[in-house]
Image: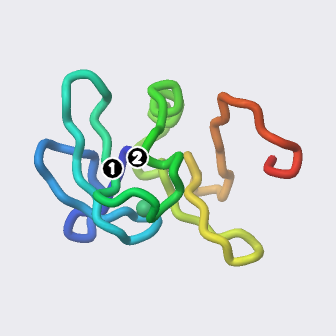
Amino acid sequence: MKFALVDGVREEPSPKVKGVCQFCGKPTMSKCGTKVRWHWAHTHKGLCDPWWDNESQWHRDWKSYWANEYQEIVNFDDTGEKHIADVKLPTGTVIEFQNSPMSQQEL
Ligand SMILES: [Zn+2]
């Protein structure tokens, strides 16, 4: 994930910083190496959506066409289920980027 909450503020990762996942509220750790793009990862696996820590560069690049404040926005659907929109615009338009097959039901 590109953003986590650090002292309650959404921030991009920087070296050796701890945060909180804006989706599940569990601890995250900045990952700022040289081989993989900088990102946040949960400190314990299995606490959140598994895809969330493994965002591809393709996905990150697409989101980055929009301003940071429109990326990774927490939303609730009609059933109350929580989701994170890749991009949500002030108009309410939600944009999700999908680079792998998806069932019609999931769509
Ligand atoms: Zn989480």
Question: In the displayed structure, would residue 30 be above or below residue 102?
Answer: below
Percent x, y of residue 28: 28, 58
Find disc 1 in the rendering and name its residue: 41
Find disc 2 in the rendering and name its residue: 1
> With 59 as the anchor, is 28 left or right in this view?
left
Report helix, strand or loop for mark 1.
strand
Q: Which residue does the image show at 63% across and 36% down from the upper left? A: 97
Pointer 2 local density, CA inside 10 Å: few below 14, some 14–19, many at least 20: many
Q: Which residue does the image show at 37% across and 62% down from the upper left? A: 21
Question: In the displayed structure, would residue 71 be above or below residue 6?
Answer: above
How many numbered circles are shown?
Answer: 2
Q: Give the residue type at disc 1.
A: Ala
- Quadrant of the image where one finds ligand 1: bottom left
Q: Which residue does the image show at 51% across and 51% down from the upper left? A: 50
Report helix, strand or loop for mark 2.
loop
Q: Nearer the viewer, residue 70 or 52?
A: 52
Q: Nearer the viewer, residue 52 or 79?
A: 52
> With 19 as the anchor, is 23 left or right in this view?
right
Q: Which residue does the image show at 46% across and 60% down from the upper left? A: 46
Residue that protrudes farthest toward the left in the picture: 16
Q: Is mark 2 within 8 Å of ligand 1?
A: yes
Question: In the displayed structure, would residue 93 be above or below residue 33?
Answer: below
Which label sits on residue 97? Answer: none
Residue contact between numbered discs 1 and 2, judged by CB atoms under 8 Å? yes
Question: In the displayed structure, would residue 99 be above or below residue 1?
Answer: above
Find the distance from the CA under tag 1 to the CA under tag 2. Answer: 7 Å
> With 73 as the anchor, is 31 left or right in this view?
left
